[in-house]
Image (cartoon, rainbow, N blue to C red):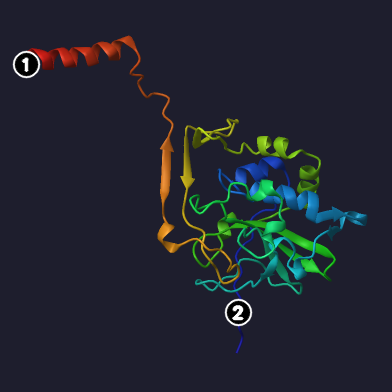
Amino acid sequence: MTVFKRYRTMKETLNELSQLRDSRFGQPWPRHGLKLLYWFANDCVSFGNENIMISECDPADGDFGFHHFENRYDENGDKLLPDIDFPYYVVGNLNSPGAEELPDYVSEDNSPDLHNSNTDRIIVSLYDEEWFQRVYVTQHHDRSNYDPNATYPISRGLLMIIRRMSLEHFMEEMGYYTYIQPFNPMPVINYNPQTTNTFSLDLSAVTPSSSDSDDSESPETQNNDTKIQMDDDTPSFNSSENLHKKMGFWESICTIL
């Protein structure tokens, strides 16, 4: 009997900063994926002859929270990544053993109260435990799956570009949302040409999956979505016209009383 394997069509490879920004990987705050990618590009990979991606960490040994990624079939009978002869490893779960080795700037916003602060991952295919064949960025979709529509290959060229930047410059180029401490914990938009007047904070919980089983958020915290509408046409109640309307209203009430 012939067995047919199903594979999703892989998203286009991200080659430029603008493509990474438009993919919305690691966006918005408090997601950690962009900082994770910056760490990976600078500390976990180097480039040899013919731009071979040399592994500067040891995914097979569990460095930095790396663990084996089982490219299983999902509920639709599809696999997230192509079947290859090399093992896949995933990193980015801030609750995995070994993740404490990651720099503080990667995990600084991780909190049980910020339920999408631990949703992003990097998946690599490792050849002979010495060099990376491919690098992917992705994010959790639900309790047991990654989101195929948010899974992208990352090119060597883009990793090289990121390596030449400071963290602050990279995050600025990505238009990453920041926040003010300690007085106002709400995100503040770092405006860029792609910014629109509406943004959404997806606060859905990140929970364990069959290939990434070390997350520890409670299921009771799932599906908390907050949307903030920025409306430039919202009237200001400090204007003299609105102040007059408000005073007229109270004058009417006083007259009735």
- In the picture, measured across the screen, residue 165 lies left or right of residue 151, that is right
Quadrant for residue 150, please give it.
bottom right
- In the picture, measured across the screen, residue 174 lies left or right of residue 196, that is right
Tag 2's secondary structure?
loop
- For marks 2 and 1, the one nearer the N-term is 2
Q: Residues within 10 Å of mark 1 (few under 14, many from 20)?
A: few
Quadrant assignment for the C terminus: top left
- In the picture, measured across the screen, residue 221 lies left or right of residue 8, that is left
Q: At x 80% / y 44%, what residue is drawn?
A: 163
- Which residue matches tag 1? 256
User: Real-space Cα distance between discs 2 and 1?
Assistant: 80 Å
Height in image: 162 above or below 151?
above
Height in image: 154 above or below 252?
below
Quadrant assignment for the N terminus: bottom right
Q: Is residue 139 visible?
A: yes
Q: Amino acid at mark 2?
A: Phe
What x and y, as percent, mark residue 76? Answer: 50, 71
Numbered mark located on residue 4 in the image? 2
* Residue situated in front as seen by the camera: 109 or 134: 109
Q: At x 79% / y 56%, what residue is drawn?
A: 44
What x and y, as percent, mark residue 58? Answer: 79, 65
Q: At x 72% / y 53%, what residue is drawn?
A: 154
Q: Amino acid at mark 1?
A: Ile
Q: At x 57% / y 38%, what residue is drawn?
A: 177
